[in-house]
Image (spheres, helix red, strand yellow):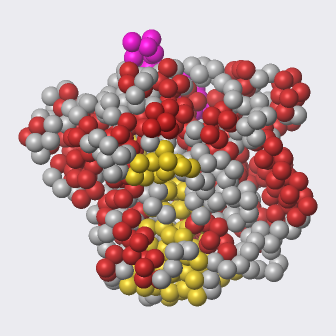
C-alpha cells in the first residue's frame, strides 16, 4: 500500500503480453482526486493510452481492470469495472459484483492495465506482490466453469478470485463479456472478446493486505447511515424490500402489467405467461436453494443459487436470474418456459456470452421467419419460430461455437441484418451496434434518452439506479420531512414532477445530466447501483461523506459532482475522437415508428426525441448540433489536455 494514501492502494499493475513484462507504477494522486477510481480512472487511463486509430482487437488496445477507494471496505460491494476500446469503436465498459475487486485491492493494486498480445494462451496470476504469467494452452477452449476448476487445481487453492473468458470470446463472438467466479459477468460491449484477442484466458488474484481508512469514526457513522437508509423494516422507498429480498426478478410482473416488457422482438409490450408461470415468484418459490451476497452486500438479492430437479432441464444449476434475463429468454422470444430461461442463463455464463446479444439476435431471426425473410433451411433446419424454446437453446450453443446459422448471429444483430437485408434492418434492436437490454422506450421517454446517449451503448446502470423514487409520489415537503432531503439544494432547478412523467419530453435533459453525473460517481467509488435507492438515490452528500472518511481528501458535494461530470465528458470526448456524433445518439427505428395498439402506446415522435437530445446537450453545455463537448466545458472541468487533443484531431 502507498503510505501517502488512504482508501486507494495507489498502484497500477502494468502487464505487456507481447514481451511478457510485468511492472508496478504509482498512480498520480491528481488523477485520483479528479476521477476517484473505478470507471472514472479507467476512462482517463484509456483515453491517454491509445490513439483513435487503435485496432480494438489488436495488441495496442488497452484492457483495464479496476477497483476504487471503497473497494475492500464494507460499502464497496465487490464491484469491478473493466474498460477498453470496444470492437464497435466506442467504449467497452461494464462491471460485475462478487469478490474479485476487493481481492485485487488486498493484493495492493487499484488497477491492472493489460496491453499487447501473447503468442500463446496465458493467464495472469497475482499472488500479492508476486505476479506471473502462466501457460493457459490447456485452458483454451474450456468453458468458464471448467477454467475456474482447472486453475484452482493447478494453484492448489480455492481462496482465489478469478475473471475469465469462455469459448465464445475465443471464437470472436460479437459482444462477449468477462465472467467472474462462475456467475458474475460484466462489460457486455465486448471486453471479453478483447481479452481473448490478447490470448489472455484468465486473471487470478489473491491478496494479503487491508485497506487503510483515513477517518474510521466518520466512516463507521456514515456506513451506519447508509445501512439505515436501506433497512427493509423502516425504508420509505417501496422498492427497497422488494430488491433486498427478491432481487430485480421481483419486478417482472409489474413490468408486464405496465407494458414495460419487450415481447416478440418488441412488437408487443407484455406477455401473458408472465402472470402465472414465467415470473419471479415462481422462480423463488420453486427453484431457489439459498442466497449469497456479493462482498459485504447487506442483501442476498442478486446471488440466489437455483437448481432444476425435474423435467426437461433437470440438473440445471446456476446463480440468480435477473429480471432482464427472464424477460428476454421468455417474452422477447415468445417462450413460455421459466426453466428454459434459467437454462439459457447458465449456458451463457459457461460459454461467456452476452445474454442480451444472444436473445435479441435470436428474436430478430424469429421475426425474419415470421415475415418470410428466412425459412427453416436458412437456419440449419432449426425451426426458429417465436415460442420454440428448444430452437432458442440450440441456437445459443451454435452462436458460441459459430456453427452454421449461428455464425451469422455471432456477428451481432446489426451486422446480421445488413447481410440478410430485405427490410430486416428495420427490426434490429441495437444502439451504437449493441443490442438493447430489455428496457422499453416508447412508453418511457427517460429510458429512450438514457439508452440513446450512452457512450458505451445501452447500459441503464449508468443513469438509472435502477428504480429511483418516483418524484410524482414524493413532494418536496414529504422528502424534507421523511428523508431530510432538500431537493432545491441537491437538484437545483430540475422539475422532478415534470421530468418523471413517462411520455413528456420536458425536463428529461436536465434530469439525465444529473443522473449521469451522480451514477458516474457511484461507479467510480465504486458501490452497487442496486442499493442506490431511497435517500441514497437522491442525497449524494452521504456518498461525499463516505468518500471523505475513506480517503481523508477534501471532497465536498460540489467537487464530487464535478468528478462525475468530468468522467462523463471524458467518455464523450473519447467516442467523439472515434467519430461518434449526435447521429449515433438514437434508438431503434421500431421505437420511433411502430405503435403498439393493443396497449394504446404510440411510437416516440422524432421531434420529441430531438427536443430531449437538445435539452440534454444544452444541460451539459455540449454542441447541440454534434453532441460533442465544447472546448470551454472541457477547460472548465480541468480537461484542457483533452480539449487540445480533440482540436488536434479536428473534432472541435
Nearer to me, 119 or 205: 205
Quadrant of image for the N terminus: bottom right
* Residue 544 appears in the rendering: no
- Residue positioned 39% across, 17% down in the render: 595
Q: Residue 452 appears at what percent x and percent y?
A: 50, 38
Q: What's the residue at 72%, 25% (across, down)?
A: 471
Given residues 299 and 284, the one toward you in this image is 284
Most foreground residue, 631 or 230: 230
Residue 323's spot in the image, x, y percent? 49, 38
597 in the magenta segment: yes
- The image quarter containing residue 416 is top left
Task: Report the side of 166 relative to 206 (left or right).
Answer: left
Q: Position of residue 106 (x, y in %)?
A: 67, 75
For residue 64, which quarter of the picture?
bottom right
Q: Residue at x 28, y 63 (%)?
A: 171
Question: In the displayed structure, would residue 277 be above or below residue 541?
Answer: above
Residue bounds of the magenta highlight: 596-617
Left or right of 401, for residue 539: right
- 393 relative to 493, above or below: below
Q: Residue furthest left?
A: 377
Q: Is residue 153 at all visible to an observer of this figure? A: yes
Residue 525 in the image: x percent, y percent? Answer: 71, 58
Toward the right, the furthest residue is 217
Is 374 contained in the magenta span? Answer: no
Q: Is the stretch drawn in magenta largely helix, strand or loop?
A: helix
**Quarter-wise, where is residue 26 in the image?**
bottom right
Amino acid at each position: 500500500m502507498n503510505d501517502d494514501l488512504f482508501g486507494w492502494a495507489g498502484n497500477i499493475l502494468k502487464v505487456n503480453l507481447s514481451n511478457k513484462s510485468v511492472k508496478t507504477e504509482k498512480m498520480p494522486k491528481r488523477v485520483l482526486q479528479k476521477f476517484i477510481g473505478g470507471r472514472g480512472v479507467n476512462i482517463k487511463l484509456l483515453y491517454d493510452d491509445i490513439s483513435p486509430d487503435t485496432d480494438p482487437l489488436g495488441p495496442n488496445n488497452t484492457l483495464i481492470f479496476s477497483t476504487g477507494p471503497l473497494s475492500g471496505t464494507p460499502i464497496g460491494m465487490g464491484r469491478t469495472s473493466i474498460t477498453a476500446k470496444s470492437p464497435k469503436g466506442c467504449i467497452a465498459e461494464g462491471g460485475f459484483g462478487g469478490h474479485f475487486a476487493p481481492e485485487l485491492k488486498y493484493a495492493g493494486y487499484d488497477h491492472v492495465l493489460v496491453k499487447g498480445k501473447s503468442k500463446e494462451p496465458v493467464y495472469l496470476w497475482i499472488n500479492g506482490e508476486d505476479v506471473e504469467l502462466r501457460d493457459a494452452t490447456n485452458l483454451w477452449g474450456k468453458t468458464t466453469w471448467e477454467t475456474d476448476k482447472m486453475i484452482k487445481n493447478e494453484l492448489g487453492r480455492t481462496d482465489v478470485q478469478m475473471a475469465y473468458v469462455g469459448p465464445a470470446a475465443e471464437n470472436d463472438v460479437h459482444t462477449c463479456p468477462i465472467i467472474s467466479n462462475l456467475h458474475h459477468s460484466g462489460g457486455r460491449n465486448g471486453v471479453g472478446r478483447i481479452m481473448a484477442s490478447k490470448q489472455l484466458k484468465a486473471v487470478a488474484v489473491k491478496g494479503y493486505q487491508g485497506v487503510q481508512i483515513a477517518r474510521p469514526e466518520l466512516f463507521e457513522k456514515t456506513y451506519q447511515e447508509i445501512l439505515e437508509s436501506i433497512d427493509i423494516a423502516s425504508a420509505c422507498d417501496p422498492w427497497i424490500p422488494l430488491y433486498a429480498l427478491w432481487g430485480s426478478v421481483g419486478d417482472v410482473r409489474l413490468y408486464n402489467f405496465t407494458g414495460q416488457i419487450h415481447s416478440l422482438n418488441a412488437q408487443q409490450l407484455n406477455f401473458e405467461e408472465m402472470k402465472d408461470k414465467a415470473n419471479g415468484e415462481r422462480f423463488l418459490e420453486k427453484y431457489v436453494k439459498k442466497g449469497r451476497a456479493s462482498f459485504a452486500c447487506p442483501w442476498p438479492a442478486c446471488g440466489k443459487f437455483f437448481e432444476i430437479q425435474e423435467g426437461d432441464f433437470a440438473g440445471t444449476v446456476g446463480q440468480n436470474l435477473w429480471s432482464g434475463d427472464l424477460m428476454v429468454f421468455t417474452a422477447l422470444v415468445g417462450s413460455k418456459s421459466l426453466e428454459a430461461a434459467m437454462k439459457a442463463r447458465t449456458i451463457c455464463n459457461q460459454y461467456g456470452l452476452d445474454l442480451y446479444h444472444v436473445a435479441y439476435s435470436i428474436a430478430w431471426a424469429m421475426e425474419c421467419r415470421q415475415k418470410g425473410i428466412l425459412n427453416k433451411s436458412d437456419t440449419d433446419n432449426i425451426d426458429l419460430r417465436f415460442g420454440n424454446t428448444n430452437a432458442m437453446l440450440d441456437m445459443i450453443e451454435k452462436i458460441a461455437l459459430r456453427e452454421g446459422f449461428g455464425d451469422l448471429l455471432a456477428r451481432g444483430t446489426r451486422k446480421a441484418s445488413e447481410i440478410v437485408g430485405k427490410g430486416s434492418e428495420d427490426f434490429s434492436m441495437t444502439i451504437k451496434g449493441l443490442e438493447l437490454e430489455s428496457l422499453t422506450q416508447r412508453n418511457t421517454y427517460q429510458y429512450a434518452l438514457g439508452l440513446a446517449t450512452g457512450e458505451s451503448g445501452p447500459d441503464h446502470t449508468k443513469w438509472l439506479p435502477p428504480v429511483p423514487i418516483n418524484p410524482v409520489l414524493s413532494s418536496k415537503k414529504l422528502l424534507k420531512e421523511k428523508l431530510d432531503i432538500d431537493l432545491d439544494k441537491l437538484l437545483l432547478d430540475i422539475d422532478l414532477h415534470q421530468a418523471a412523467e413517462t411520455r413528456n419530453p420536458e425536463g428529461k435533459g436536465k434530469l439525465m445530466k444529473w443522473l449521469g453525473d451522480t451514477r458516474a460517481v457511484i461507479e467510480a467509488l465504486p458501490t452497487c447501483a442496486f442499493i442506490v435507492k431511497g435517500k441514497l438515490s437522491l442525497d449524494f452528500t452521504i456518498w461525499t461523506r463516505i468518500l471523505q472518511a475513506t480517503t481523508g481528501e477534501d471532497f465536498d458535494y460540489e467537487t464530487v459532482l464535478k468528478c462525475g461530470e468530468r468522467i462523463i465528458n471524458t467518455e464523450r470526448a473519447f467516442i467523439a475522437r472515434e467519430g461518434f456524433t449526435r447521429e449515433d445518439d438514437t434508438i431503434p427505428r421500431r421505437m420511433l415508428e411502430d405503435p403498439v395498439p393493443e396497449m394504446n402506446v404510440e411510437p416516440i415522435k422524432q421531434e420529441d426525441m430531438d427536443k430531449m437530445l437538445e435539452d440534454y446537450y444544452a444541460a451539459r453545455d455540449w454542441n447541440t448540433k454534434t453532441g460533442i463537448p465544447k472546448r470551454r466545458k472541457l477547460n472548465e472541468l480541468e480537461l484542457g489536455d483533452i480539449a487540445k487533443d480533440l482540436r488536434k484531431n479536428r473534432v472541435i
